[in-house]
Image (cartoon, helix red, strand yellow):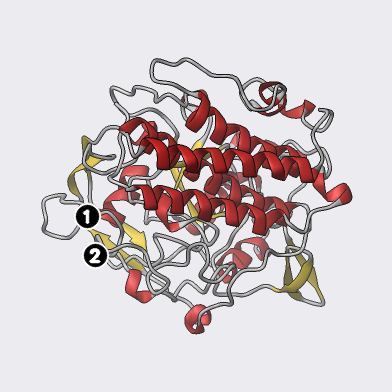
Amino acid sequence: MMSTSEVDADGLRGMLVAARMRTLLLSRDLDGERLLGPRLRIVNPPLWEIGHLGWFQERWCLRHEPGGALAPSMREDADELYDSAAVPHATRWDLPLPDFAATLSYLQRVLERVLERIDRDGVTQHMSYFVQLAAFHEEMHCEAFTYTRQTLGYPPPPIAPALPDAGAGAWEGDVEVTGGKMMLGATADAGFVFDNEKWAHEVEVTPFCIARAPVTNAEFTAFVEDGGYRREELWSTQGWTWRSECRAESPVYWRREAGKWFRRRYDNWEPLPPHAPAIHVNWFEAEAYCRWAGRRLPTEAEWEFAAATVPASSGQKRRYPWGDAAPSPALANLFGVTGDCADVAAFSQGDSAWGCRQMFGNVWEWTGDWFCPYPGFVRDPYKEYSEPWFGDHKVLRGGCFATRASLLRNTWRNFYTPDRRDVLAGFRTCAP
């Protein structure tokens, strides 16, 4: 069953336009070699990825008909160029891609046609679902554009300056969570949700203690300086193999000079902010830190329980950690707020009912669980979204500073392979 929220025509138009404005913001300064970039397993050629956004929106909002029929594209070569399920990643640099101007023209023509269709046909359930799917898909790619710019050392995108409390300091200690029964996952009245969130099913969560905030750069520095990357006993077999093969000695964008740690932020090296959350660390690094610190990663159910439930409420859940009010710049460090990680003590108004801070925003948080389907899983029409990745990806929760607020709810599941440290991920820990 496809699930949609009640969004009127103006709302749907606004979602599409906002996503497209962000795409253009992140790509308008690309030219020359930057449009393709180096061949890397973890990124797409930016020129290809921009065209893919137009293809996806056209495919689902204009070409896809009830029953599964697929109308022709306005570009005869669109499927051969941009279908991510059919075009192998390694070949995307070699395709006869249209130039940047033609690519942007394709995006604009698709958007105009979709907006015209909304005006002409009104908001049907079919159109509402696929417009939201296209808008959210584009927002997810915009987050990918953001970390691609970091990976490739491009200048930072122009984003609003940090809020005054972005340098609020540390936020140490644990909170005790009593546990109990909870419906893990989304319910049918939640509005638009992805297939991997469906459907809520009862789980029993035993009492646990979870950190009030994610692990900070200062805390992770102690692990690094205690030889954490050289001590095989701290790593799983898979993790040690990964560390050895890539010769990691610290997080990917760190370096030490004259006794001080620095980080590369986009194209600039700057002092490592001690109280910001550790970011660009993969699941193996998080696991090794936990073993060093005598801690562990939360399970997915523990994370959702700490984010969504209220003490003494018999597992009753809220949509966001702070309640049901929509995200705002005072509540979470999401896209458009700071453009970077804030200190972990910032955004105190966004605490969960249990006292956990920044369960939304700042950094995605690794959990201990593999990404697997919930009981009774049925894939949605966009079959490549979840099903191909079950079993070999790890679950992350909570969003980051580059995540659009409209994407998130306490049941939202992100997923990456455990070796990925280019993504905007950190972690919080639990007592053993």
Decide: few, some or many residues near mark 1? Use Cα within 10 Å; few <14, some 14-19, many ≥20: many
Give residue 428's mark.
none
Q: Residue furthest bottom?
A: 164
Q: Amino acid at mark 1?
A: Thr
**Image position, residue 152 (x, y; %):** 78, 52
Q: Amino acid at mark 2?
A: Ala
Q: Which residue is mark 1?
A: 309
**Residue 44 in sight:** yes
- Most foreground residue, 249 or 54: 54
- Most foreground residue, 230 or 259: 259
Q: Secondary structure at mark 2?
A: loop
Residue for point 39% across, 25% down: 380
Q: Which residue is mark 2?
A: 353
Q: Which of the 4 quarters of the picture holds residue 208?
A: bottom left
Q: Which of the 4 quarters of the picture holds residue 196?
A: top left
**Residue 169 in sight:** no
**Image position, residue 389 (x, y; %):** 52, 28
Residue for point 48% across, 44% down: 136
Q: Quadrant of the N terminus?
A: top left
Disc 2 + disc 1, Cβ < 8 Å = yes
**Image position, residue 132 (x, y; %):** 42, 42
Residue for point 82% across, 33% down: 93
Against 364, residue 380 (above or below) is above
Residue for point 38% across, 35% down: 121
Q: Secondary structure at mark 1?
A: loop
- Most foreground residue, 312 or 196: 196
Task: Kindly report the distance in space between the C-alpha atoms of the residues bearing marks 2 and 1.
Answer: 7 Å
- Most foreground residue, 370 or 195: 195
Against 24, residue 129 (above or below) is above
